[in-house]
Image (spheres, grey):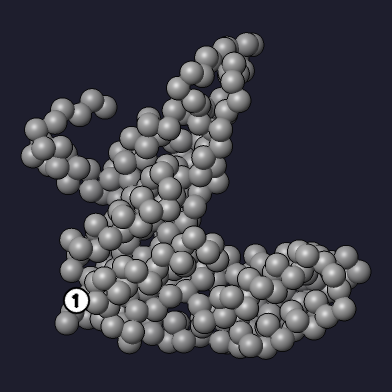
Amino acid sequence: MVSWALVMWIRPVKPLPVKSQNFAPIIICGCFRGARKVDQISPKLHIIYTVNEAGEKVSSFLPIIEGTMKGPNAVFGLIKFYLTQLTITRADKILFVADGARWIWNRVPEPVKSFGIAATQFFSLVDFYHAVEHLVKIADLRTGWKKAQRKKWVKKHRRLLLRGKIDNVITSIRSICKGRKSKKLKTEKNYFERNRKRMQYSFITSLGLPIGSGAMESAIRRVVNLRLKGASIYWRKETAEAMLLLRSFYKSGRWEMLNNFVSSAGCIMFI
């Protein structure tokens, strides 16, 4: 078994404005408008990369970045395809990272089981910085607190998360919710309770695995934000899907792989 770990991230990206087939564009004073309402569709992006025993990215392994405008099953289908190609069980450790979305975590057990990944080999984690964002939301919901109090509370519980004290964090959140009927506070409490087992940040760090979202955020910026988003930019769903494919391969350094695939399939690509 080789001495490396495979890290998988999946993240829904903020929606893109997508036109229907019958959309009639109108240019008025440099502004792009349409005769029909423009839908908002969220691209789903994933990245797969490897780290060595020190937790550093392995430069010899080009990251796999892929995205789709389709639904949850489509993005998990892509992940399963790439994991098959990688012979995933050869990795010492496998880490799956995402935000707290239920549609993601409800689909994780199936590929883990189908690939025969051992429980001692697989780890799952809620992105640390996403968890901290929820701490900020809780502090902001305490309207009676001053700004300094909110900042102090977030800083304290952020440290607790890093030290692996998730139970202490949940106890503190429960005490805040006690006697209050705020649905938003209850939602935040449920978020931490539901993801308790996926917030073992101290343990994951001790394994030499990443807890931050730098690689994922970079992929979103380079693949999606810098090309598919912008003032007066609208897409048809099928062309957005095609552009996601091209950007994913290009920005991950796998452009030649895509060219070879197209050539072997007897296709002609127009760029």
- Residue behind mark 1: 90
Front position in the image: 237 or 143: 237
What residue do we see at 19% from left, 76% from top?
90
| Residue 148, image x, y percentages | 83, 71
Left or right: residue 82 versus residue 28 is left
User: 90 above or below 84?
Assistant: below
| Residue 231, image x, y percentages | 57, 29
What residue do we see at 34% from left, 69% from top?
110
Front position in the image: 236 or 127: 236
User: 94 above or below 43?
Assistant: below
What residue do we see at 36% from left, 50% from top?
74
User: 230 above or below 135?
Assistant: above
> From where the camera sits, is residue 13 visible?
yes
Quarter of the rendering containing residue 207: bottom left
- Answer few, some or many: residues within 10 Å of disc 1's Cα (few below 14, many 20 plus, some between 14 and 19): some
What residue do we see at 46% from left, 35% from top?
228
Amino acid type indicated by mark 1? Arg
> From where the camera sits, is residue 222 visible?
no
User: 64 above or below 68?
Assistant: below
Quarter of the rendering containing residue 96: bottom left
